[in-house]
Image: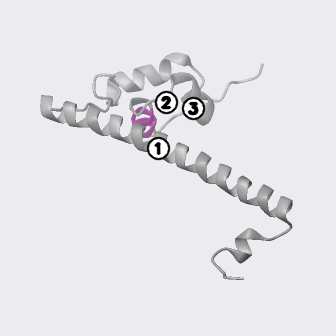
Amino acid sequence: MIKEPIKRYSQAFKQQVVREYEDGASNYSLRQKYGIGAHKTVKRWVKQYGRSGYRSELVHIQTVEDQLEFKAMKSRIAELESALAQSVLENRMLQTTIEVASQSLGVDLKKNFGKKS
């Protein structure tokens, strides 16, 4: 007959597991990570050591003005990203045009730009 080892966990260890659970780790992942056997063990620890089993959640409290400003900033960021993308495309187009013109004329226009012949 093979005897199963009995695992005993320290209070500090249990509290660490509960903190990770409350920060968003799943029961299954914690059991896998720490080799905890029973599926109810972590839940029991959460009831015993946790903040009523609640997980921490980020809550933004904003005034109406803050919400409007946030929406305006998001809109402005989208406009600036679009303008940047357009500028990058225009720059690439101009660079390609210069390269094609240099090849057609047999002159390095980048090197000779601005020089008087």
For label 2, the residue is 25
**Total marks placed:** 3
Mark 2 or 3 closer to N-term?
Answer: 3
Q: Give the residue displayed 57% in from the left and 32% down from the top.
A: 7
Q: How crowded is mark 3: few (under 14 residues within 10 Å), some or many (20 or more)?
A: few
Mark 1 belongs to which amino acid? Answer: Ala
Quadrant of the rendered image containing residue 43: top left
* Location of residue 62 in the rendering, given as x and y in whole percent from the top left corner: 17, 32
In the displayed structure, 84 sits above or below 68; it is: below
For label 3, the residue is 7
Mark 2 belongs to which amino acid? Answer: Ala
Q: Give the residue displayed 59% in from the left and 35% down from the top.
A: 34
Left or right of 19: which side holds 100? right
Mark 3 belongs to which amino acid? Answer: Lys
Q: How crowded is mark 2: few (under 14 residues within 10 Å), some or many (20 or more)?
A: some
Q: Nearer the viewer, mark 2 or mark 3?
A: 2
Secondary element at image label 1 = helix
How far apart are labels 2 and 3 at the CA level?
Answer: 22 Å
Q: Are marks 3 and 1 in contact (CB under 8 Å)?
A: no
In the displayed structure, 52 sits above or below 101; it is: above
In this rendered view, identify the residue nearer to me: 103 or 63: 103
In this rendered view, identify the residue nearer to me: 67 or 102: 102
Question: Can residue 51 be seen?
Answer: yes
Does the stretch in magenta take in 18? yes
Q: Give the residue displayed 53% in from the left and 49% down from the top.
A: 87
- Would you say the magenta stretch is mainly helix, strand or loop? helix
Question: Can residue 63 be seen?
Answer: no
Segment tinted magenta in the rendering? 14-20
Mark 3 or 1 closer to N-term?
Answer: 3
Q: Residues within 10 Å of mark 1 (few under 14, many from 20)?
A: few
Q: Which mark is residue 83?
A: 1
